[in-house]
Image: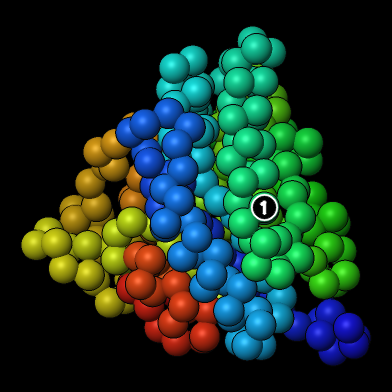
Amino acid sequence: MTGDDAAAPPVVLKLGGSLITEKDSPETLDEPALDAACDAVADALAAGDVDRLAVVHGGGSFGHHHASERGVSTTEGTRDADAVAAIHGAMKRLNARVLERLRERGVPAVPVHPLSLAARTGGTGGGLDLPLGSTATLLDEGFVPVLHGDGVATAGDGVTVVSGDELVVELAAGLGARRVGVCSTVPGVLDGDGAVIPEVDDFESVADALGASDATDVSGGMAAKVRELLALDAPAYVFGADGLSPFLRGEGAGTRID
Ligand code: IPE
């Protein structure tokens, strides 16, 4: 790897938990969807469409199931170590399966576990402190770091949930991402008639159209996603499975949020 490659801004991609798992059935993968997503990532890296890539995946039926059972969310913490172990353990099981499928396809994917790194030092109302030294160095060394929604130490509240969307925002800002992609089961941000809104540049203009997620989602659904992505310098795209390959090729996909 040359110095020029090391300096190139990375692409940050989130694979939604709803995409890669069966969200209503505890700890169950959506195998075809996960395989297709991993194929798209492997193909894009092999073709040289993307050279530096950081991936984040959500919780789906792994994280959300355990978190909601124990009343833990991004704003409600726990001081019960068993609850933390249940949430983190489930997310590590999902992460291991995502990594395995990526590596099977030749993607040099390695885990980065947010519980071991991050903190909400200002409590639930404060920002997320996510040190990026390990992720940045892994990228420089040619790896594809794969982070995931997780538990996070939270001042005054024990351990809360950190969503994949929050991690994407921190990674994109901290690494100076070139582009950000959020791939889920919906083809983009939808208007009141269910049509994809091609571009969003302020929250108020789409606030009415953004309802809450109907399946169990302890971390906020589409409205929270849009808010967080709007705060980024890099263009972000929200798209469905069909948008993943175009996004990785550098094309538009779903809704552009900028
Ligand atoms: C949540 O991550 C992780 C846990 C519940 C521990 P996300 O909120 O990003 O997951 P999805 O993509 O909505 O499933």
Q: Foreground: 205 or 3?
A: 3
Q: Is residue 17 left or right of residue 255?
A: right
Residue for point 56% across, 20% down: 77
Residue for point 59% across, 26% down: 87
Q: Is residue 133 left or right of residue 233?
A: right
Position of the C terminus, as image quadrant, is bottom left
Q: Is residue 135 left or right of residue 152?
A: right
Which amino acid, by three-letter code, is at mark 1? Answer: Glu
Q: Which residue is mark 1?
A: 100
Position of the N terminus, as image quadrant, is bottom right
Q: Where on the picture, by quarter, is residue 61?
A: top left
Q: Is residue 143 left or right of residue 21?
A: right
Residue 233, visible in the rendered structure:
no
Residue 132 higher or lower than 129, as above or below: below
Residue 76, given in percent of the width and then of the height, sits at: 50, 22
Residue for point 45% across, 72% down: 244
Spot the residue most to the front: 104
Q: Where on the picture, by quarter, is residue 190?
A: bottom left
Residue 28, given in percent of the width and then of the height, sits at: 45, 36
